[in-house]
Image (tube, helix red, strand yellow):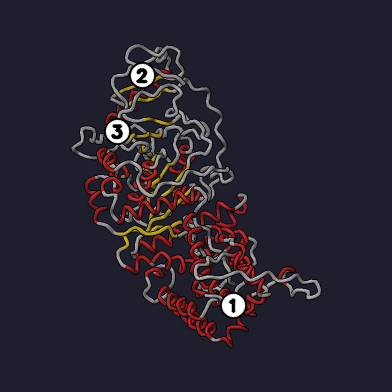
Amino acid sequence: MSGDSGAGGGHGNDPAKLIEQGGLQIFREPEPEPEPAPEPQREPEAEIEPDIPEPDIETELPPLEEPPPASILPQEELGARFDSDSPTATMPPLMVPSPVPSGSATAIAAPRARGVRIVAVSGAKGGVGKTILASNLALYLATIGRRVVLADTDVEGANVHTVLGLTRPDAERIAASRAEMEALASERDSGDGANGHGHAHGHGHGNEIGHGRGHGRGRGEEPLRLIDTNVPGLRLLDAAVDTPALGAARRLRRARLLGRMRELDTDYVVVDLGSGTESTLLDFYLAADLSVYVTSPEPTALENTYRFLRGLFARAVLKAAPDRAVRHSVAERLRRLGGAPAPLDLVRWLETEEDSLAILARATMETLEPRVILNQTRLRADLELGDSMRSALRRRHGLTIDYLGHVDYDDTVWSCVRMRRPLLVESPGTKASKSIEKIARRILAIDTGKGRARALLTVPPDSHHDLLEVDRGATDEEIRRAYKRAKEVYATDALCCHGLFDSPEIDALRRRLDEAYDVLLDPARRRPYELSIFPAEPVDAEDAPPDESDSEPRPPAPDITPETEFTGALLRVIRESKGIELKDISIRTKIGIPYLRAIEDDEYGALPPLVYVRGFVAEYAKFLKLDAAQVSRTYVRRYRRYLEDRGKS
């Protein structure tokens, strides 16, 4: 495609024309070919499956370089861009771009090897901080060298531009330009537009992306308008989903945006989805490459969060259905349970009815792992709310959330919004800014495959161990601490349980906690209980009793000093020098043989969370009559470094 942005005569035989009217540059498309016959109308499916593309999860993505721990641009340089005393600081409503040359990457996005990464941000309600987080996340990505588009798709009122200090495009000039474009189209249809119109009289105020391939926009839809900002590498996408632009036939459908965003020439598109549980929002959240949900430590916000997660599961299980018949069956069962039931309720009901859909529902429940951010934390109890929500949600809904962290309440955030200045630019050293940067680094770690691995379930579901969240080899002290925490999580007035449990359910759960505590602290009752619920460990050939007739001589015992760094290999040598088998340690300590083997092989990825590893290593050392404190300290130090390198700390 070619175009001419100079003033003067027509464009001759150029396949595309650049029209400039009222200060807005618009590409006039070439003479269209005859429209193909419209596709037959699909039968309505009770809002089951809107037409949005699925994410390509099969594509192998090369890792990005590790992001630095803080903003890259020097503070004085970045701050000068927003400093009102600087001669270049004035942030206009639209940055005036240079004319778009023919075939440029801005006019038509070229396909990229890695592809555009879509980061969706939703929230529990208005004012929870989703727009602040989305805009500052986009700003952080831009300051570390990524090309970022910040898209505002909040149908209740798009205002990301306000947070960045921008204003929306001039409506009157857009209306005038669109009226001119419609007039030109009318003249072209009547045969009077062949000589070319549209002499340029000024500068454009935005880049319109509407000619990409694969996901063309529908008739009457607004072209995607990219607005340059004063932050290098950051552009704003005015999606026009809240109100149609003047002259447009209707609002842009959010369900059609995802495919068109993937055609943009950028690294990341950070999308502010707004709040709610409408189907297009849930589908966009599920189809994005990375999705986060922002909530706050308030009963209303948590209630909306749990409602959102139930709706998200319902949409996920519908989209997991392999065909239309199965989708209708799933939708019918969801309606029978109220439309968006607790995932665990649906799974248990289907399993009780011996319904074949139970497998699909359980697989969806166990694989769905929404990422949650807690914003505006004030109290010490708020800092523990994320982990408490994770426990309560798993107990009541069967869902496991990935808690990314919290953002402290900070009056500076309010001040920045009031002044229409980005938080990371205006106040980069505040607690809120540091929390957002930490969360941004975790999101990047997840995107590059270095995020925290999901903890494996090591105990039978609904067992006493599962209820207290302790492993089979938990010590009495660990059981006491777990019981105390569980009683706080499931207190009658616990914030995390609001909207999840009613009073009878809480009372029944607390009675089960008391029973679990009594059984696991009584050796006479604990051992028979564990033998009844834990399967017998298969004895491998290497763990079988050695044959004395052909047994090899034991290796010599290594020298141990107060400075010795204990590794898994060293622990194995010590064990073998004493003639002890892993089976013997497992029977005495109640630690599974797979975990003992993982400790000796230094296979950190196969080990449970840090708190359990510390106890496992200490019990292992006590059995070998080693200094448990020294062994645990040196081994856990190396394990902690492993977690920090992968963003799991």
In the image, residue 444 sits, relative to residue 112, either above or below, namely: below
Pointer 2 or 3: first along the chain: 2
Q: Residue at x 29, y 33 (%)?
A: 94
**Secondary structure category for the residue under label 1:** helix
Residue type beneath disc 2: Ser
Name the residue beneath numbered marker 1: 623
Considering every residue shown, the one lying at the far right of the view is 549
Pointer 2 or 1: first along the chain: 2
Between 368 and 587, the one lying in front of the other is: 587
Q: Where on the picture, by quarter, is residue 124? A: bottom left
**Secondary structure category for the residue under label 2:** loop
In the image, residue 328 sits, relative to residue 104, either above or below, namely: below
Q: Residue at x 41, y 70 (%)?
A: 497
Quarter containing the C terminus? bottom left
Q: Is residue 482 visible?
A: yes
Q: Residue at x 47, y 47 (%)?
A: 284
Label 2 vs label 1, nearer the camera: 1
Residue type beneath disc 1: Phe
Q: Where on the picture, by quarter, is residue 457? A: bottom right
Q: Real-space Cα distance between discs 3 and 1?
A: 70 Å
In the displayed structure, does residue 307 sit left or right of residue 161? right
